Image (cartoon, rainbow, N blue to C red):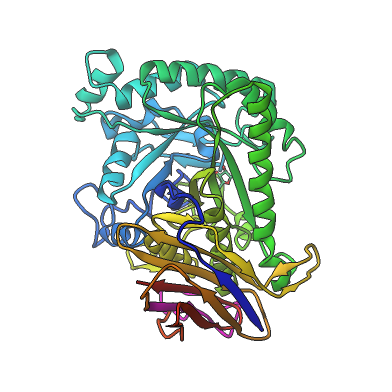
Amino acid sequence: QKAKMIIEKDFKVAEIDKRIYGSFIEHLGRAVYGGVYEPGHPSADEQGFRKDVIGLIKELKVPIIRYPGGNFVSGYNWEDGVGPIAERPKRLELAWRTTETNEIGTNEFMDFAKKVDAEVNMAVNLGTRGIDAARNLVEYCNHPGGSYYSDLRISHGYKEPHKIKTWCLGNEMDGPWQIGHKTAAEYGRIAQEAAKVMKWVDPSIELVACGSSNRSMPTFAEWEATVLDYTYDHVEFISLHQYYGNYDNDIGNYLALSLEMDDFIRSVISIADYIKAKKRSKKSIYLSFDEWNVWYHSKEADKRIEPWTVAPPQLEDIYNFEDALLVGCMLITMLKHADRLKIACLAQLVNVIAPIMTEANGPAWKQTIFYPYMHTSIYGRGVALNPIISSPKYDSKDFTDIPFLESTAVYNEETEELTIFAVNRDQEEGLQLECDIRNFDGYKVVEHIVLENPDLKRTNSVQAQPVAPHSKGDASVENGKVSALLPKLSWNVIRLG
Ligand code: AHR
């Protein structure tokens, strides 16, 4: 089959905010303890952070990490995690029914983030706590000194403020599973007041209000509208969360789930713009897709976790090749909305539904989903373009007119590199791509990376990495036209320069 694309330098969606390649580390399972932090591990640094994990995170070029939750944050007292480690309390962690030792807290995590060259997207607890704890945390982190909480930070050994720019106003407050679950109006009011005083402490911060926990929530849409009605003038972002799974083992349908993600994004933009219209506001609200991924492989195993243990293995999905294809489709989908979607966090980063896994006292290794995430994060910087695409289509159980070709292009004005990201959803045959790159005169193929595998269920492990990309794609350029064979069910990165 054949698909066509036209890429034009001037058809711009927007400059990509690098935060779109963010990730997430929650105090959950072995993400922190036994993940990024394992004192005694052969690669641990002086603070107990694993240098091998730091290396892999740097390979991903993660620009921002959401922390410390997730559901965890809705019961978290940030004060438990600062000051002398020996004096920190052990707490029952009610979100995931474990014991939290508080060995790692705000300052240690900020040190870790520096080591991986990432900013932190800090979440405040609007479940059990509220305005006071939130504004105190901003003061502790961002105020230079001369006040109670900023001086407390200095007394803990951190003279310089952390200058955290991006903050989340709670987590999934629409979900009955959330500690301190609220109605939209209850949450809207507390988020509004928390946002107001957090910005009084530091007017330079940017705030994310909680949208729905997923598109299927019964309160979806009404929730966003109500929350934004309260918070519109005080926040910059509304959040989206979505996880997918191939529950029916139906690959055609599974790979089409990114179309649902696209619809979700469009809906939230519409709701935000409805409130903008209602308020006659000049300001637009941006989107933070601060939890997204595949999550379903580990759900059964997690029912058997012994409660109140420290850092048990939770949410340890082992991803297969087809999951990497969907992750690729989701990344392309988000790039298409680079004008309104400015933050996104792959949930999560280490061990918990993660691209990076660690063995206790052993090596760290790359899951299948590591690759599309890494490729977009490295090569997807610059301007998101809006290519014109025509592709043959198919229907599946829940979708119609699914294009076999899922694709977009990014132009990096600094390096003058043009990159095409493409997934071929066709299960039967390769797709012959013809791409007109009309005003990229003299451009040649730098590399055509392909992730393919004859077995959709193939996974990586600490012993073997059978799902890994190669650079033997056949893309070539002739007379301003790229032609490339995209193998059946494959992820492709065509780099041109
Ligand atoms: O990422 C795992 C969990 O998924 C988060 O804690 C929560 O916000 C979401 O439901």
User: Looking at this view, is 251 or 42 the one in front?
Assistant: 251
Q: Nearer the viewer, residue 53 or 492?
A: 492
Question: Is 463 colored magenta in this rendering?
Answer: yes
Which one is in front, 316 or 229? 229
x, y (%) of residue 344?
50, 48
From where the camera sits, is residue 192 visible?
yes
Residue 303 vs residue 50: left or right? right
Residue 430's x, y, as percent? 61, 85
Residue at 36%, 66% (x, y): give it.
417
Judged by its main secondary structure, the magenta piece is: loop
Instruction: Give the residue at the far right of this rendering.
Output: 397
For residue 60, what is the image quadrant? Answer: bottom left
Residue 288 placement (x, y as % from top left): 53, 41
Residue 13, position as x, y percentages in the image:
52, 51
Residue at (52%, 73%) from the top-left corner? Answer: 436
Seen in the image, is 293 located left or right of residue 375? right
Quarter in which the N terminus is drawn: bottom right
Magenta-highlighted residues: 445-468
> Above or below — where is 321 with respect to 85?
below
